Image (tube, rainbow, N blue to C red):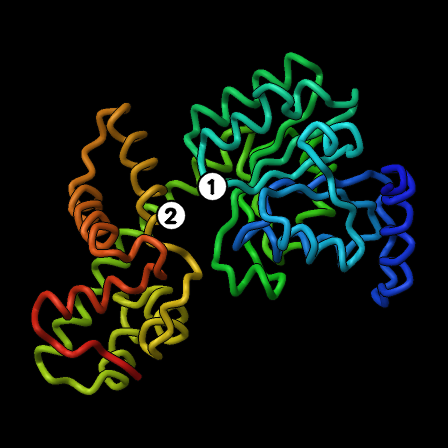
Amino acid sequence: MAPPLDARIKSGHDKRNQNNNQNLEELMERIGFIGLGAMGRPMARNLLRGTGAQMIVYDMNPDAVAALVAEGATAAGSIAEVAANADIIVTMLPDSPDVEAVVLGPGGLAESAGAEMLVMDMSTIDPSVTDLLSKALGERGHGFVDAPVGRTVTFAEQGKSLFMVGASSNDFGRVKPLLEAMGNTIHHCGAPGAGIRTKLVNNYIAIVMNQVNAEALALIQHFGLALQPTLDVVNGTTATNGHLVTNYPSKVLKGDLDPGFRVKLADKDLNLALDAARTADIPMFLGHAARECYGLARASGHAETDWTVLVDLACARAGLKPPRL
């Protein structure tokens, strides 16, 4: 029979303190983490390593949970168990329905929360769902923070993520030590809901620019230009952007299409921005064109591929060799 949960938490906490050489001040609040996917797992690991806090984790993937348990976290058997044994609960989940179900659904966080519970959602979801969660938890006396993540999985693994935070001043102060353990750039964007809206603006630019760059690189191939000198020129003008400076050279241009940011997630985020714009009657002409390209990428079997694959797809449609450094 497994030992009681309190004993498991203490055991994991003692193990982590024995292995933690960073000598950081121990957090008094217990942390829960739900969602240990491509972004969530390195975030949780950095949080575990960077604080002295007790952490209880939950995910549908037992291997992801086991990896965190091996480093000193405690495994939860349910969402309710996380709620009952954590003060601040971080959620990092794929989409709006997942977050809403975890927080407000049967057996969710709201049903089992302690009096001082605060939920910090780091997912990229529909802002209307963020507003719903903030209102529902606030009516129950619980705190809510939206803190979506900027930058890629590689940055998350290095503890160099950027966070766009929507929170009251008090709640921002409460979660700031956690964010500092997971990243190196924190922007308090305003009240709850401001973080996710900032993220959609940021991702709209990045996702549309990804397609613009793909077409430009196909043109480079058509002209027969040497890739590196051409990129040196572009990166020395206002045409430069993060894809060309950091993202492409570390991914598609070296032939690495293992997913850092998947095509299907870029497509999802783009649609969130377009839906919000449609509601406000804001025309987004380039966004709709880019959505067609991401749809074609998904239809051609690249939903799980790194989003920089758009470069190779643009070249393939033109019968050109894909660019490589």
User: Where residue 228 appears, x then y in whole percent?
Assistant: 28, 84
Q: Is residue 181 visible?
A: no
* Residue type at numbered disc 1: Pro
Q: Nearer the viewer, residue 277 or 239?
A: 277
Image point (73%, 34%), residue name: 82
Disc 1 residue crowd, few under 14, some 14–19, many 20+, Cα 10 Å: some
Where is 86 relative to 293, above or below? Answer: above
Mark count? 2
Where is 137 relative to 126, above or below? Answer: above
Mark 1 or mark 2: which comes first in sequence? 1
Which label was assigned to residue 265?
2
Image point (20%, 56%), residue name: 300
Question: Is 174 left or right of 254, judged from the image as shown?
Answer: right
Q: Nearer the viewer, residue 155 or 189?
A: 155
Where is 225 relative to 96, above or below? Answer: below
* Residue type at numbered disc 2: Leu
Which image quarter holds the C terminus? bottom left
- Contact (CB < 8 A) between labels 1 and 2? yes
Image point (58%, 42%), residue name: 60
Residue named by callout 1: 94
Question: Is 87 left or right of 198, judged from the image as shown?
Answer: right
Question: What SS does tag 2 mark?
Answer: helix
Which image quarter holds the N terminus? top right
Where is 238 relative to 223, above or below? Answer: above
Q: Is residue 241 visible?
A: yes
Question: Is 150 left or right of 60, judged from the image as shown?
Answer: left
